Image (cartoon, grey):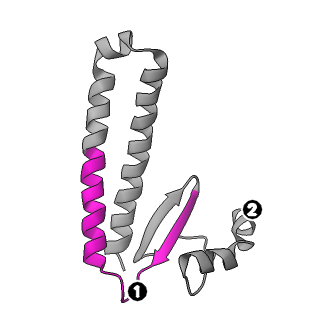
Amino acid sequence: DHPRKFSKFKTILKKMANLESVEIVDKKVNGAIHFVHKADEFYIPTTEGVDISKQIGELREALHYTEGFLESVIKKLSNKKFVDNAPESVVEMERKKKEDAEAKIRTLKESLEMLTRK
């Protein structure tokens, strides 16, 4: 059902993102910038105008930052005093931050892998 979901938006996507074409694929695209929105994966093939080494550097920087952020959230959740005394909504928000950071780290690592594999 996903291909049909996006088929009707091809023209809009092309115009909004200034793309030559939009294709719906059923496998990963090597050598592409990759991102995930909800459960859908998107790939933007790199072209001559894209500085791959700059993209890789930015992804590594984002990965380093996100790993540090995750470490601080894990430290907070490991603090029994915090977990026992904070309102449940605050603890739950920290758990959500942890899940989000872990998902972002997976995506960043996969994006790095995709860019370095041609």
Residue 5 covered by magenta stretch: no
| Quarter of the N terminus within the rendering | bottom right
Do callouts 2 and 1 mark residues in contact (Cβ within 8 Å)? no
On screen, residue 80 above or below 104? above
Residue 118 seen in render: yes
Q: Residue 16 shows which numbered tag?
A: none
Residues shaded magenta: 40-67
Residue 110 found in image quarter: bottom left
Q: Which residue is mark 2?
A: 1
User: Residue 83 location, x and y as percent?
Assistant: 36, 16
User: Residue 76 location, x and y as percent?
Assistant: 29, 25
Q: Amino acid at mark 2?
A: Asp
Residue at position x 61%, y 80% from top?
15
Q: Residue 47 shows which numbered tag?
A: 1
Residue at position x 35%, y 73% from top?
115
User: Residue 27 location, x and y as percent?
Assistant: 55, 70
Depth order, front residue of 18/77? 18
Residue 49 covered by magenta stretch: yes
